[in-house]
Image (tube, helix red, strand yellow):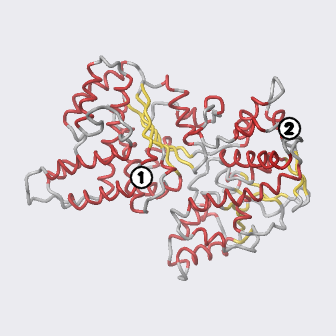
Amino acid sequence: MYKALKNSLSSLSAEEDKEFHFHFVETKYLKRLVSYESDIIYGTKGVGKTALRRALAELNGDFFFSTITIDLDSISFEAVYNRLTALNSTVKHEMHTLSRATWKNTLLSYALLSVSEKLPNTNCLKNKITTILKEEGFLKPNGHSAAENSNYRIMNVIENFFQKIISLPFSKEKTLVGVTAEQQNIVNKFPLNDNILIVLKEVIEVVKKSSKKALVCIDGFDSIVKHTSDSREAIFAGLIDAVYFYRLDNELSEAFCFKAFLPQELTLEANTITWDGDKHLNNIHYVSWEENDFKSFVEKRFAPFSKKKYSRFNDVWSEYLPERILNTTHGIEENTFEYILRHTLYRPRQVLNHIFTIISHWDETNSGSDKIQPSFIPGVIAKNNKIMATKVAEHLSRIYPNVINFLKSWQGSSSIIEVSKFREKINRYFFGDAGLNEHNETDKLFDELFDFGIFGVHANTQTNPISKRVEFCFAFVGDNINSSIHNSMKDNDLIAFSPMFREYCGCHATKEGVIVPITLDNFL
């Protein structure tokens, strides 16, 4: 009964989904992004950034003159950063400026490549673009190859900076920033190659005649592992700044648009350096999901295996899973789907993971002969919570090295605690034994852990004795990101760990009732 459905559910990521065109759920974000504006799209790992990118390029490709994706899964943060550092020691220029210049030239080369791939082989402009990109080392002399990945191309752009700088005649005259006037001109020069300017004008005219724009997507950062705080700051801040440069440039924005899909945990630091909310507020998109989006997502996965001709979520769901389960910990009945959803951080991959695990375990245990029983589900969710929370914690440990010890320190505590106790532990585990006031980073980390969905804040002072539900506001419900939540919290206010983290942290069940995530709008 479950075998075919289980195989369909096994594709947890958009990258490996062979039925993506059917499975994709058109949320409000796709409508916002099918535009000719350059945008920054960011969110947590598994929230659907790559799915949005694929929908733009594959399902809406006709909207654009051409599309191309810069897949950065092969980029080495450290290699690029070390090369930029070497360039920095040569030019004595701030890292952010060098990173921005590198990205501006890299994005332009991809944009030109995108247009050339749309043109017929006999087209004169196509040949001109190819020739220039080969001159720049962006394309190998013998054409495309697997070696021409993003890391290779970005390194070549930096190498071009080196070659142009070391070929300059020696000069002792320095500018205000400590470099020679000639070096300053090279760093500020755009594009770096004079020959590109001639071709660029032709490209812009060709694209403008189509009344469309060439789309360049930047994706793949979620798979990057090796990086340091300095490399993140340099590379992400420079990339974001470059995207904004293209958005505001009157001439270039007539032909090109850039969509950068960035992970939240690697973007927050760059946010404080580069982002200008007044200028770019409408072009910054934090991706989140609503309950109805999740139902549509699950419905599309279940529908092909339904026996009903006109299936809706409730119909297809009830064919395989029970409508309600008994939460024995709190002695209440709950809607099964809502129970599963609140044991995630509202990421579609996590919802799919829970459902896949339930079905797989039932199929293995019961030979798939009977419908899944309600009593079977809570135990599977509890075990899977620990696995999924471990992955999230390990991911966050790239940014906060001691976050795992911090989370594990709550072993034996309640899932609901006072803000003052939470802040004290943040300070102790991340900043040593010094007083809270001596570390202005404490509030920042409090906000970021909230934004990542690790905990929610109490929205009501009273629980509902009938439903045994207590509502907490979580950042992953709704569009409220970077809310500076610490400004709204008092020491005796309450916070709750996300239900997905209870087993991982070793917290015991709350006496107050079931923790229900709700939107932050009701709190602020």
Provide residue 45's location: percent of width, then percent of height: 58, 50
At x 49%, y 24%, the residue is 63
> On the image, which quarter does residue 121 sit in?
top left
Up the image or down, 379 lies above or below 124; here it is below
193 or 178, which is in the foreground? 193
Up the image or down, 457 lies above or below 157; here it is below
At x 46%, y 38%, the residue is 259
At x 82%, y 23%, the residue is 309
34 or 7, which is in the foreground? 7
The circle on residue 18 is none
Classify the position of the N terminus by image quarter: top right
* Badge 2: residue crowd in 10 Å (few <14, some 14–19, many ≥20): few
Up the image or down, 116 lies above or below 457; here it is above
287 lies left or right of 345:
left
182 lies left or right of 76:
left
Which residue is tagged 2? 318
Provide residue 178's location: percent of width, then percent of height: 19, 61
412 lies left or right of 478:
right
Provide residue 432's location: percent of width, then percent of height: 53, 80
Badge 2 amino acid: Ser
106 or 425, which is in the foreground? 106
Which residue is tagged 1? 236
Provide residue 160's location: percent of width, then percent of height: 23, 46
- Give how far apart the Cα atoms at labels 1 and 2 are: 45 Å
> On the image, which quarter does residue 139 sit in?
top left
> SS of the residue at dot 2?
helix
Pick out the residue farthest to the top.
Answer: 122
Q: How many marks?
A: 2
* Badge 1: residue crowd in 10 Å (few <14, some 14–19, many ≥20): many
